[in-house]
Image (cartoon, grey):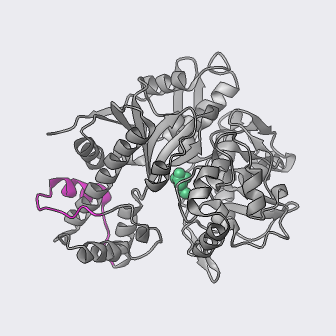
Amino acid sequence: MTGLIGPGVFELETVARFPNDPVRTIDGLHWDILSLYRHALAGLATAARTGRIDSVGIDSWAVDYALLRGNRMLGNPFHYRDERTADGVAAVHAVVPADDLYQLNGLQHLPFNTLFQLATEQLDGAESALLIPDLLAYWLTGRVVAERTNASTTGLLDPRTGAWHAELLERLAIPSEVLPELVDAGSTIGELLPSVATEIGGHGIGSVTAVGSHDTASAVVAVPATTPDFAYISAGTWGLVGVELEAPELSEAGRVAGFTNEGGVDGRIRYLHNVMGLWLLTETVRQWERDGTIIDLPALLAEAAAVTEPVAVFDANDPEFLPPGGMATRIAAHCAARGLPAASTRAAFARSIVESLATAFADAVSTASELSGRSVGVIHIVGGGSLNELLCQLTADRSGRPVLAGPVEATAIGNMLVQARALGALGEHDVDLETLRRLVATAFPPRLYSPRP
Ligand code: LRH
């Protein structure tokens, strides 16, 4: 996306949208990283044809990486939903037990956190490990860095200092040299390599600026909060539900509840819980379509909103829903095994998923508030899920709190605001996150869903 941002101006345009389909090969599930890069270059070329682009910022999903020797990528990055991580978890926990690990890195236990993935690798031949946005930035600029918000999802960062955790690296025998120099969102990564600039052509592109390169970090920047007592839900494939803190919260209760301390822009802490998210619905639809039925998602959701039969509210967080494939079958089996009602129609099935997600969202907001001691007067839902009216309304109903929905493009907006601030386009360089959020609230007024009795 491109953005035109200045005092009183905030225009967004989508210049390219492309699929991000994983590829399964004999050794497991991978990202098609070269295809993503090719599409990104084509998008930059399109953007540069319309005029000079001052800056580019890159964000993506977290945790996944490529290993490099010199400038050569050693294999295609794995997808975090690849099953190989189970061995990595066992290997790490044999050296650093789970409760100990939480005190060191403050992360929710997710079997795909980078440190578990790295435990399955031969690191001998690797000179650097680059997370996906850092890899793309390297290909554009030739500079090897690790942007700090995304680095926090590796499980190898000390949440108290924001530095790579030397003790943890030593205990896990991960050579610290493979981890790049950390940089903060807002700093300049570099100019485009001449070969890249030539390929993109047009009016050219200024520098690559580090942003909250973890997509969720950028989304949280763009939560249009106007009061301090808010919780956020970045709702897309995942539902990232939490509050923003000034310092990490490392209580044992937080570990048991699955709360993570991820790094936010400007040194904030994203104290949140990963809820399985709309993945449950999209994977279900994918199975139905594979089985031969074309699904019209907006129509399905409208029918789901009208369902009156009692539907199963199941545990959306069950790790059995993590891998791809056969989601409708797995959800049905999960519900049957627990004596929950079986849905009689596809609409009822979809309603059951959305009810379960809204319940998990509402529970996570309450838990975030209890564990952090922060009162929550309003819940902001940003990202693709903010367009899902049923989900927004049910989250308001189940939490008993007002929900403010939107913007849908929060990640891109947060990404661009950090660039705009760094370039001085907002007037001053020291504009704080609260000011950025008020700008978002004015430019993209959210939609209110009041809780129903
Ligand atoms: C959302 C997200 C989330 C991570 C997951 C791997 O896209 O970045 O914050 O936990 O992907």
Question: Which image quadrant for residue 131?
Answer: bottom right
Q: Looking at the picture, how far across and down is residue 420, in whole percent?
A: 64, 28
Question: Which residue is pictured at 64% across the width and 51% down the height?
Answer: 104
Q: Quadrant of the C terminus?
A: top left
Question: Which residue is pictured at 42% across the width and 34% down the height?
Answer: 373
Nearest the eye: 369 or 138: 369
Left or right of 45 in this view: 233? left
Question: Which image quadrant for residue 375?
Answer: top left
Q: Is residue 365 magenta?
A: no
Q: Which residues are magenta?
A: 292-314
Q: Is residue 313 magenta?
A: yes
Q: Looking at the picture, how far across and down is residue 98, in whole percent?
A: 57, 61
In the image, residue 273 above or below residue 206 = below
Nearest the eye: 103 or 179: 103
| Farthest right residue in view | 70
Q: Looking at the picture, how far across and down is residue 139, in whole percent?
A: 78, 53
Question: Which residue is pictured at 24% across the width and 46% down the height?
Answer: 398
Q: Looking at the picture, how far across and down is residue 46, in whole percent?
A: 65, 45
Question: Which image quadrant for residue 327?
Answer: bottom left
